[in-house]
Amino acid sequence: MDIMQILALVIPSAIYLAAPLILTALGGLFSERSGVVNIGLEGLMVMGAFTGIVITLTLEGMGVGGASTWIAMLVAIVIGALFSLFHAVASISFRADQIVSGVALNFLAVGLCVFLVRLFYNKGQTDYIQNRVYRFDVPVLSDIPIIGPLFFSSAYITSYIAILLAVIVYFIVFYTPFGLRLRSVGEHPMAADTMGINVNKMRYIGVMLSGAFAGLGGAVFAVTFSGNFSATTILGQGFMALAALIFGKWHPLGAMGAALFFGLAQALSITGQQIPLLANVPSVYLLIAPYVLTILALAGFVGRAEGPKAIGKPYVKGSR
Amino acid sequence: ASEEPETTTDEATPSEEPAGESEDFKVSMVTDVGGIDDKSFNQSAWEGLSAFGQEKGLEEGTDYRYLQSATMDDFESNLRTLVREESDLVWGIGFLMEDAVRTIAEQNEDGQLAIVDTVVLDAEGNPYENIANVTFKEHEGSFLVGVIAGLQTEGNKVGFIGGVESELIKKFENGFKAGVKAVNPDAEILTQYAESFNDATRGQQIANNMYGQGADIIYHAAGGAGNGLFTEAINRARNGEAVWAIGVDRDQHEEGLYGEESVTLTSMVKRVDTAVYLVSERTMNGDFPGGEILEYGLEEDAVGIAPTTDNVTEEALAAVEDYKAQIQAGEISVPQTDDEYEEYLSSL
Amino acid sequence: MIEKLLPKGRLLSLVVPLIAISLGGIIGAIIMLISGYNPILGYSALIKGIFGDTYYMGETIRSMTPLILAGLAVAFAFRTGLLNIGVEGQLIIGWLASVYVGIALELPKVIHLPVAILAGALAGALWGFIPGLLKARFHVHEVIVTIMMNYIALYTANAIIRAYLFVPGERTDSINETASLASPLLQSLTDYSRLHYGFIVALLGCVIMWFILWRTSKGYELRAVGFNQHASQYAGMNVGRNIVLSMVISGGFAGVAGAMEGLGTYGYMSILSGFSGVGFDGIAVALLGANSAVGVALASFLFGGLQVGALNMQSQAGVPTELVDIVIALIIFFVASSYIIRWVINRVKKEDV
Amino acid sequence: MSYVIEMNNIRKEFPGIVANDNITLQVKKGEIHALLGENGAGKSTLMNVLFGLYQPEKGEIVVRGDKVKITDPNVANRLGIGMVHQHFMLVGKFTVTENIILGSEPKKFGMVNIKKAAKEVEAISDRYGLKVDPYAKIEDISVGMQQRVEILKTLYRGADILIFDEPTAVLTPQEIQELISIMKTLVAEGKSIILITHKLKEIMSVCDRCTVIRRGKGIGTVDISETDVDSLAAMMVGREVNFKVEKTPAEPKEVVLSVKDLTVKGSRGVNAVNNLNIEMKAGEIIGLAGVEGNGQTEFIEAITGLRKADSGTVTLKGQDITNLMPRKVTESGVGHIPEDRHKHGLVLDFAIGENIVLQTYYQQPFSKNGILNYPEIYKKARHLIEDFDVRTPSEYTEARALSGGNQQKAIIAREVDRSPDFLIAAQPTRGLDVGAIESIHKRLIQERDKGKAVLLMSLELDEVLNVSDRIAVMYEGEIVAIVDAKSTNEQELGLMMAGGKKQKEGEAQ
Ligand SMILES: Nc1ncnc2c1ncn2[C@@H]1O[C@H](COP(=O)(O)OP(=O)(O)OP(=O)(O)O)[C@@H](O)[C@H]1O
Ligand SMILES: Nc1ncnc2c1ncn2[C@@H]1O[C@H](COP(=O)(O)OP(=O)(O)OP(=O)(O)O)[C@@H](O)[C@H]1O
Ligand SMILES: [Mg+2]
Ligand SMILES: [Mg+2]
């Protein structure tokens, strides 16, 4: 394989692998920027994947066809947002430790989804969906030399949506009144309170947005990659998204960059095994390379990552 | 409720066994973490057990049943529960259960156990008298799909994706490679392991790489990670590329569907159900094959190609029949390990 | 009566978790009812599957063993303000190291067994040292590094087994008898459960954690650093070193958890096709147990019991094991939300007066 | 009725305590009304009720003649009530403008119109002479500047009733003067101000009337023109207060600490301390005066090992302690009452007893072979609690639950008890009431009399003048003058602190 061939394999797959991570990390960003740790991203993705598949299957059964997956993704957004209320109610209203309630959410999601699959289908995993999100070559752009094959060929539309959303979230978080208020609540909730901002309401919104985005992330994963849902469909992607969020220093574009970095590292490690030059390297080195690279990158240039100041603490009016 | 099926049972029992015994006959299985609907060997085993139960008029849940394991930790507990319920035959599905089955067999000398996909030996290397060992000649079935792949590849390049490397998966790999080379000695075969039986994205990326390098047919033995192969193949087929996927364990035609067509060229089916049925029946008839190492292969129709053959050429189908006969006749010895494969290659 | 005792707080801190457990159970029952299972049948099978006979009790205790240690690992790090998501990886490495020592060495039991456990602890500690060092030195967030270290552990352990320790059956050889925690006595007492001496190690772990944190000056330092790094630095403590130490001890506990699997339950290590899950359960156990030694032990009992009992619930009442996951999640939810339970109790009390 | 605010019979309870017990406060339009009381008397609570942060159990609030229910700060804002909080309510990572507009942002295409907002902020700030940079980040500006941002927040919202909760506790004398003139401008415009402060002199100089509360109960309201400092203090504390610090002349002995050519980099990489030289002797209190941000903090951090010195030496009793680890510095005989008691001074989640041994926990008798001896630790704690009159339910109480004054006393007890040769007290009385201040000053002088060297860093010129024997003035990282405390005054100090006199004069001895 020549270098162009390798890049043409690695870069598109990095981009498409990153999409669910980007979406989920953006979700985590809303929650954490509002001051609520969200270790439940994994569970929210599970819920999204479950919803994405079940709704697609149901709609296909009703003869909806190609639109099924898209409707399913929208439903996953809603269900994700609703399901995240579990975390929101516990950690915001009931003042539960945010990490505990996130962990509980992870348990609940896997248990509930598989339980429901058994209830709906009488088996532990769903059938395969017929309509998926498919890859396409972006018209015109894919014909540009070099850039075309790398960035605009065999791409999933969901990847572009994810990247676009990252940019939109960036603007929302840093340039709109909503973003300003969201961040103020995560930095200094009491200050926000004295400015007439309803701290708990903002946090509810933050957590529900995290549910919406992570739900979408899970659904995108399921309808693009796995095609069905089982207990093992989402295995650690939520934690990787959390890592991307921190890696990206709680910044939407940073999180996107981190997710793309993870995607690239994984794609390289898998493609690497097909590169003759590396054929004699024991495969374990390539397998662990993405994770080692991430650690090196963190230690080398990224360094200190400081989250929102008030993160992890429930807001109790009048306490100091 | 237990009296109800009595009459049917009597009628259905072909043997001369006293009615009392068959009425009491209880058979059960413990699944791997995949559960009875893993679209793989657990599911197949349960299908075999269900078919057996239904045909013999047994009652589901009491006379024939399964327990699912949530983690590896549960194998032993589950097996034990069933043995203690005095099940006449308890199945452990999958080679991961080897040690659990051994432990239970040692603790319950009266229990009758059977295991799929491996052979349980004691410290001296002898099989246990109370364990029936059921294995398959996956390499033979894989050989046949290899023949199809070798004949139908257009670019003379095919691929194999394994799940996690193991002795068992190696049988699939080497059988497949041997089949390809048998009909197409010039063909190049790419192989890669996903290091996971679950991660569809890894399967997809490997498939992407292989197709990207010009392979047009890929066979997988990677469980859920194999889902990614179908995802990738469908994506490419929709873009007009002539690529194929070969399924494993059962007919994976469904996984390959896009619109009216399927990217599934064929599948290597492994009839765990058949084996489970046959051994259960022997046990019910008082002929428990304890201490035996049963190897189910082409002979018993326990491995082979899937019934859906829409995408397979006439020529390839004919070749399959031809090679099947040769293997059964012992004219070809299909390699299982890497060493045997090397030997096989040099003999070509 | 309750009126009189409640204000003392002690009883309240006992009553609240019990209420939380009951609430989780009640909602679980409602879910069973809605989905067509018989909750009474389900729960009686569940309880029988925990306490029903000596076998089940043996299994419950066995499954608690690694959970306790994994929980201690998470809790210990938490006390120093660190979230160790890497218990899973540390456990895997500890498992591998203990099994390796169990296979490779030939020693009398009194030496071999402790050495094998220690090997697990050291390996886990090493795996915890790396994120600790990176945190102390470069301020790298421990959550990311520990997540990454999990994957590195998984793949590395598999590769090492394949390369050096492989026997048919996709696993290592079995450990020498001299390194084994397995006990024919315990097995026969519990009707052939897999109960092994590891539970003593786990309980010892609880005592050690309690002792380090609350009885030693080092523990005082670790807790101080956990609460307020600035004040700790002002008071002359070396914050970085304490962070590293905390992760090392945490990893050590996790490594011993792995050793319990390797030397006790299994006696070997398999090639893992995925994470064992014990490390992640450890997070829940630690937090459910309020990061205290006793709490972790009790939470492990709840966790281990429910997971073992779930098997019986499945086999006797046909209720899928996932229901137990749901119930566990709800219990964690309610325990974590004890603020609201206390609030309600206070309300009720006020109205009574 | 000319009252703009009437709070009638307000009662506010917290679990186990009545913070406001039937308090009445009436504020006239256009006046500066002082609210006076000891720490924990309930002043902040009362104001938080007025601002809508707390809901009172009883009582009514009348604003401009209308009875109102102030359910949250939004309602207060609508009623034209603004509050500058005791602990600043500013988001450190936001800019000045972002902090000011938060909650009522001007918009353009759905985005925050930051340009327009900044212009408005600039306009208001010019109008009242506040001089802030609208684009500066809060964490980069001085405390005085931050306070102006707080004031701007209320003005931006059009408040005409302003509450200032201890605004001067953290300000330099210059800043206080500026604040006072700002307040006067505001009142001249017809706005009304409620001012909380522990500094009676300030009340006397700017306020029209004063309401005094003690332990949650209203004691009364007086016209400033008809009262004086002593009677105000007596009203507040319930007894006579001695303002004059009683002390004998210093008897300085040998040099305890000598600092030579010390240079220290600040957090932003530029030199915060520049070639600093000073000697401190046993048996004297040296006051360290200076406008905040002139390197005092970095200087102290460098001595105590919390910050690296780039060059120069620090010698304690002949032993070089430059750049030693904090523990070694402590062990060689330095005590340090830190500036920020919550950040550095205490582990708030630890019991008071555990905090008492924060630097000595590893030593005998509190530890032996690495094992803690709790009975000894708590015995020590009980002893010190009694000795230093720390008001706490018990030695097992979490430090968090103590009032600021008592937290401070606990820290002082701990530092003094170790009997260090050199004691640094950084802002030891910030935010405390007169009673607490009195007892802390007594302690510092006692230490001096025992033959210790004491460095008192304070922004409070009164305190520096009253307690110190010599005063070192710091400006831009250098000691610009060392003067005898008896032979100088506030004006002169203020001038030197502003960099007015560069040459060292009036050096003692
Ligand atoms: N959030 C709270 N929770 C419980 N009690 C509180 C709370 N805030 C204040 N209190 C109680 O109310 C009393 C009054 O506190 P407040 O803060 O109003 O005092 P203050 O007069 O402002 O004191 P200072 O002069 O130190 O600012 C305190 O003694 C305390 O007991
Ligand atoms: N979160 C809290 N929980 C319980 N009691 C509290 C809390 N916050 C304050 N208090 C109580 O409030 C009282 C006074 O607190 P406060 O902080 O107003 O004191 P202070 O001397 O004004 O301190 P500071 O100088 O920091 O303002 C203390 O006696 C303390 O018991
Ligand atoms: Mg106060
Ligand atoms: Mg106050």
Image: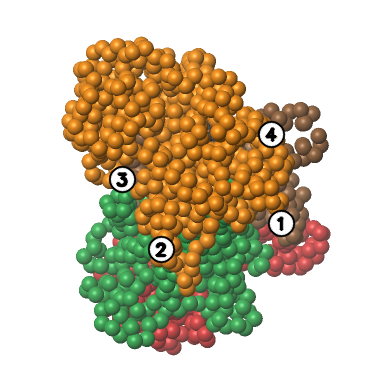
Name the one closer to the observer, A227 or A93: A93
In the figure, is residue D286 to the left or right of C55?
left
Nearer the observer: mark 2 or 3; the answer is 2
Q: Which chain is orange?
A: D
The chain containing the residue under callout 4 comes to D
The chain containing the residue under callout 2 comes to D
Colour of chain C, in one word, is brown
Q: Which residue is mark 4?
A: D21
Q: Which residue is mark 1?
A: C31
Whichever of callouts 4 and 2 sits on the residue coming sooner in the sequence is 4
Label 1: few (<14), some (14–19) or many (≥20) C-alpha neighbours in 10 Å = some
Tag 3, which secondary structure?
helix
Q: Quadrant of residue D473?
A: top left
Q: Which residue is mark 3?
A: C138
Q: Which residue is mark 2?
A: D119
The amino acid sitting under disc 3 is Phe
Q: Is residue C108 above or below residue D43?
A: above
Q: Residue visible at 55% across and 50% down?
A: D191
The amino acid sitting under disc 4 is Asp
Tell if the residue under mark 4 belongs to the same chain as the one under mark 2: yes
Tag 2, which secondary structure?
helix
Tag 1–tag 4 contact (CB < 8 Å): no
Q: Quadrant of residue C230?
A: top left
Nearer the observer: mark 1 or 4; the answer is 4
Tag 1, which secondary structure?
helix
Q: Residue visible at 58% across and 54% down?
A: D80
Q: Which chain is red?
A: B
Task: Indicate how the structure is coloured in the image.
Answer: by chain
Q: Is mark 2 within 8 Å of ligand 4?
A: no
Q: Residue visible at 49% across and 71% down?
A: D110
